[in-house]
Amino acid sequence: MLEIPVAGIPSTTTQQLPAALNDVPRIGSTMAPDVERIIKLSPDLVIAAETSRSTIEASLAGATTPAAFLETDSFGDLEFAVGVLGEASDKQAEADKFSHR
């Protein structure tokens, strides 16, 4: 949707992901991320669900990689998350196409 490069995704996702993500490295589960692998991938930003904040923050405590935690419980949360990601990645115009505001 926003065509933001993805460095890694959780291995425990139960959602059907787009085929374009088939070769993206897996970074452990959302509740037990492989921090060494994440850091080795050199992401600009680690993005995770708000529900995993305490686990991810604790795991990344010694790293300099910034993290953003977004609510994903409702469609409104998803719209907001896409807006935040659009702003953070200089793709606000693309993000605005997704929003129903």
Image (cartoon, rainbow, N blue to C red):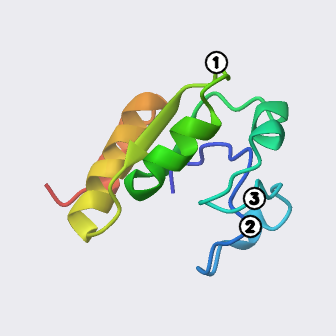
Residue 6's disc is none
Write down the residue under mark 2: 11
Marks 2/3: CA distance? 5 Å
Residue 59 vs residue 70: left or right?
Answer: right
Q: Nearer the viewer, residue 66 or 3?
A: 66
As drawn, the residue found furthest toward the top would be 64
Q: Which residue is located at x 63 percent, y 81 percent?
A: 16
Q: Amino acid at mark 2?
A: Ser
Residue 28's disc is 3
SS category of the residue bearing label 1: loop
Q: Nearer the viewer, residue 16 or 19?
A: 16
Number of callouts in the render? 3
Q: Quadrant of residue 60?
A: top right
Marks 1/2: CA distance? 23 Å
Of the two numbered discs 1 and 3 on the same chain, state the one appearing first in sequence: 3
> Circle 3: is it few (<14), some (14-19), or many (20+) Cα within 10 Å?
some
Q: Is residue 46 visible?
A: no
- Point out residue 84 in the picture as x, y percentages from the top left corner: 35, 39
Q: Amino acid at mark 1?
A: Thr
- Point out residue 56 in the picture as x, y percentages from the top left corner: 56, 44
Of the two numbered discs 2 and 3 on the same chain, state the one appearing first in sequence: 2
Write down the residue under mark 1: 64
Q: Amino acid at mark 3?
A: Gly
- Vertical comparison of 39 with 33: above or below: above
